[in-house]
Structure formats: structure tokens, C-alpha cells
Amino acid sequence: MKKTLLSIALLLSVATFAQEPIGSFYTISLVPEDPNQVGYHIVTSASGPDQSAAGANIIWNFNDLVAETETVTEVMMASAEEIASYPGSTLTVKTTITGGSTTYYYLAVNDIGGTSLTGAQTSSVVLNYNTNNGFIGTFPLSFGFTNTDAVAGSFEAGGVSGTFTGTATSTVDAYGTLTVNEGSANNTAVTRLKTVQELTLIYMGIPAGTLTQTTYSYYNNEMVSTGPIFRSITNHLNVPLMNLDETQSTIESYDASILSLPEVTGTAKILIAPNPVNDVLHIAGSDDITALTVVDAAGRTVLQSAGNDVSVSHLSSGIYYVSATAGNAVKTLKMVKQ
């Protein structure tokens, strides 16, 4: 009987970890020493990879990936110029391909984690959601979440400019484990966010074509706090007026060795567990937390304390950054407050 109960407890523990909510679409640390940069391999896959499966306890084994080059994704506060061009933007997500192009995504993130897409610049198209932003969701997002939002704005593609209308659908459609042969995920618990944009491009008042974008983003909040650990983006652009009908796909796999920074001596084992946090913030890995500071997503200090267990029941749900001091070392961690 005891063995049965223990087995059930272990299964529940694994299931809870696998269903970890997605903390944020992309996020920025306001701690000066944090780089807010993540390195990925751009990979190809002879088999796809197959991402059709959705639901609970999915096992993704992407083991035929071939690395071609690298990218660096950096999350920054939107500049005054970017805010003027893409109204409402608070964050800029910049991805640079080694020896290649740079793409930008502009996001509006409010104090409670509500996240909307305000703009995008790629080598083939520029989208400005200046009429109706694309609402993604209010993070953290859990398995089963879905939202469809109307979007509208202006576009530029191939020297042609006009407007667009359409929908953006976000769904936390799966969770399970991810293993890749190129990158750092190895039987890693992930939760997947699928986003689909279906846009009609309008030129001189006439529907001129369509753009469909499907993105799969796999998140593990402990491994990468800035964004997903694996992502694929497929764009299908069809503009008959320009004799343009093309599909472009990009697959990126996070690699800890790209842009890796050494841990502050003595802090590598310090972490928040469990995370997300309900009423009590528990710091594991050290019995000597002499100081603890909690900062919200807007950079405001909301709590200062000490010790390994600190009440955070008064904090609103959302993303916070915790600086924990152990001896002479300080480590900054991301906390998801439920």
C-alpha cells in the first residue's frame, strides 16, 4: 500500500512539473548585469519535425536536426522611436542570424502580464498592428488556454504597401517532454504555445493576398527565462499581384553554450522551488539567504526580506525578479506568482 501511494505521489509530482505554466511570451530582466540574450542553433530537419501531436504528456524527440548557423535573441525595452512607429510597444525582441538578416518583434506588455503583438519586421514583410494589436494572452498561461483576437494594421512587402485584417489565435495546446540532438533540451519538461495568424493583405482597397504564420514555442521557465527553448515559425505569403507564393520556415533550438555566462561563484545551485509560487517563496540550494529583494516587471521593488521562506501572498499574479544573497554572492531568479 505504501509503495502504491508513493508511486501515485511521484506521478502527480511529475505531472505537475510537466504542466508548468508558461511564465511569459518574452521577458526582460531589469537587473543591470543580466544580458537578456539567448543563443539558438538554426536547424533543419529532414522529417519536419512532426509537431502535429497535441494534448497531455506528449513526447517530442527531434533527433534528426542539423545545425546550419546560430542566432542571438535579445529582449530590450522599446525605444522612443520604436514606440512612435509601433504605438503601445514596451518590449523589442531582436533576433540576429549569424551572417544573415535581423528580425524584430514588438510587444506591448502591461503590469499584469497581458501581452499583445504591436509590430513585426522580417526580410520579406513588415507588419504594423496600429489599428488593432494582436492580443496573445495574460501570462502565466496554462495548458488548455486559447484565445482568438481580431487584428488589423498596415503592411509592406516587396515594395508594395497596404493594410491588413485578420485573426490571431493563441493556444497552449500541449505539454510533455522534449529531446533534441542539437541544443540543450534533453528529456526536458516543456509547455507549448501555438500561435496562428491568418491575415488578408489589402492593396488600394482590394484584397491582394494572404499571409499565414504558424509558430510553435516550447517553454521551460527554469532553463530559459527570456523566451522559449525551442521554436519554429512558418510563413506562407501568397500575393498573386506580385506572382508571389512562397513558404519560409525557421527552426531554432536553444543551446546553453551559446552566449553562456559563468554563474556567480557559490550560486549555481540556488533556485526557486516550486516555481510558479503560490503563497510562500522558497529558495532552495542554500541555507543562508541573508537578503532577498523582489522586483516587479516594471522595475519596482515590492518586497525586501531575508531567509529561505518568505510570504508573497500579498503580491498580484505575474512575473517578478528575485535577487537572493548567500554569503558574498548574489543570484537573480525569475519568479512566476500565481
Image (cartoon, helix red, strand yellow):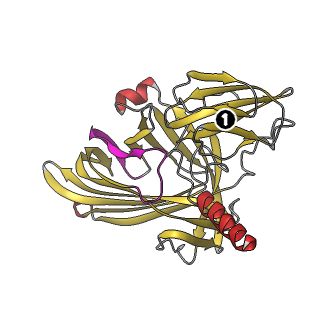
**Residue 241 seen in render:** yes
Residue shown at 13%/49% (left/top)? 205
Magenta stretch: includes residue 247: no
In the image, the segment drawn in magenta is 124-145
Element marked by disc 1: loop
Tell me: 48 left or right of 327.
left
**196 or 54, nearer to the observer:** 54
**24 versus 189 height, above or below:** above
**298 versus 252 height, above or below:** above
Residue shown at 48%/54% (left/top)? 142
Looking at the picture, how far across and down is residue 255, in whole percent? 69, 55
Q: Find disc 1 in the rendering and name its residue.
A: 35
Tell me: 268 left or right of 213.
right
Residue shown at 24%/49% (left/top)? 164
Looking at the picture, how far across and down is residue 61, in whole percent? 63, 73
**Residue 252 seen in render:** no
Q: Residue furthest front?
A: 1
Looking at the picture, how far across and down is residue 52, in whole percent? 46, 73
- Count of marks overlaid on the render: 1
**261 or 42, nearer to the observer:** 261
Residue shown at 67%/64% (left/top)? 9
Quadrant in the rendering for residue 57: bottom right
**171 versus 275 height, above or below:** below
Q: Residues within 10 Å of mark 1 (few under 14, many from 20)?
A: some
Q: Residue furthest bottom?
A: 47
Query: In which quadrant is the N terminus drawn?
Result: bottom right
Looking at the picture, how far across and down is residue 334, in whole percent? 63, 38
Quadrant in the rendering for residue 18: bottom right
Q: Amino acid at mark 1?
A: Pro
**245 or 190, nearer to the observer:** 190
